[in-house]
Image: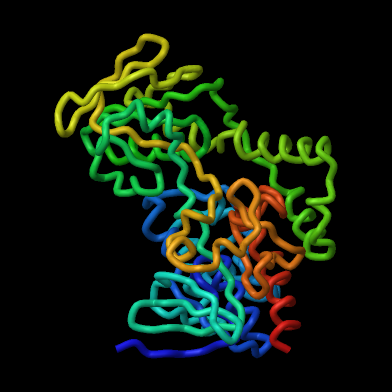
Amino acid sequence: MTTSTSTDVLVIGAGPFGISLSAYLAHFGIDHCVVGEPMAFWKHHMPRGMLLRSGLDWHLDALGERTLAAFATERGLRPQQVDPLTLAFYLEYGRWFQDAYGVRPRAAAVKSLHRASGGGFIADCGDEAITARNVVVATGFRDFAHIPPELAARLPNAHYGHTCDVVDLEAFADKAVLIVGGRQSAFEWAALLADTGARRVDLTYRHDTPRFQPSDWSWVGDLMERTRVDPGWYRRLNEHDRSELGQRFWAEGRLKLEPWLAPRIDTPAVHLWPRTNIASSEALSDERVSVRLDSGTQLDCDFVVLATGYKVDITRVPFLADGDVLDEIARHDGAPALGEDLQSSLPGLYFTSMAATADFGPFFAFTVSVRCSTALIGDSLRSRVG
């Protein structure tokens, strides 16, 4: 039997963006509910032992109280003791943050999202229907995992997987793994595979090997503060300035590798193949595959890991694809067109995280934007709900 509940605001997704917004809305007494498993992507789609590129300043609290620095201090830890941040530490911080603000997401999954006849939305959660005047889509990256079609066509089915689905790296002990990609995630997966006893790890990538050099993200915080005050500045940039800013962000995030990776891949098990592509492959058995690079090199391996990133396409979000709201959402190149409060063309429906990068910049694919997102959406909802 289906039960029905109603709320002013439904937040779909309980990752960093969702729990931060929930804490903010609760502070201002806004009726809302959050659905989803807390920090699910971080728990289930990132490998144990992972280190984050973000620092203590990339915390979740738009109110400025329950920060990463405060969490570290409460644990008796100095900043240098938690740099770089570990995945385990960040997950502990997430739990601490939720407890501090009483954020209690419902363990439910939205199956489809529909327009309500009297206005607002109805979220079908299977055994529960949630009616909400406003909905915030804060589901993050998972649905946007990108596997280039031309690459998939060159690999046999069941012999490859995207990094977000290949996180039980202990399963590859004493096995050979080929990683496609040459940026931070590819090299980190290689280091972790080597750490957990993989017999051989090969990396193939089209470009030169990035430099092992610390990324400087200090300038991004100021841009987030600017966005909080002037949300439309990024979309007003001319093509040249937007390209220049994108190049600077690209240089920090894509043309550098964190120095702590260098000694971990400096091992006989790890082999780098810069300026190469996969030309063809052949399944040798149910468990082995032979891959030929365009350099002529032949690599036999047990599995191929695709560190090929993410690409926004909201038609791939299951509850949107199975609902009736997609046709009312203006889009450009798969991303929702958003106003300065991150509200879509469908009044009351908001998007954040990676889905907002087209209108708010590449920064929204990173947790540095969480607090800015929370303030913009939260203040808009305060005005709408009143």
* Residue 267 x/y as whole percent: 37, 26
Q: Is residue 304 visible?
A: yes
The quadrant in which the C terminus is found is bottom right
Depth order, front residue of 261/27:
27
Q: Is residue 55 visible?
A: no
116 vs 338: above or below:
below
Tag count: 0
62 vs 221: above or below:
below
Which residue shows up at 49% across the image and 64% down it? 320
Depth order, front residue of 149/219:
149
Quadrant assignment, res 345: bottom right
Depth order, front residue of 39/161:
161
Which residue shows up at 78% across the image and 36% down it? 244
Q: Residue furthest top?
A: 296
The quadrant in which the N terminus is found is bottom left
Which residue shows up at 29% across the image and 41% down it? 196
Q: Residue 52 vs residue 173: left or right?
A: right
Q: Residue furthest left?
A: 285
* Residue 121 x/y as whole percent: 55, 79
Depth order, front residue of 84/374:
374
Quadrant assignment, res 305: top left
143 vs 68: above or below:
above
Which residue shows up at 42% across the image and 80% down it? 106
Q: Is the image coloured rainbow, by chain, by secondary structure, or in one colour?
A: rainbow
* Residue 360 x/y as whole percent: 72, 54
* Residue 233 x/y as whole percent: 83, 54
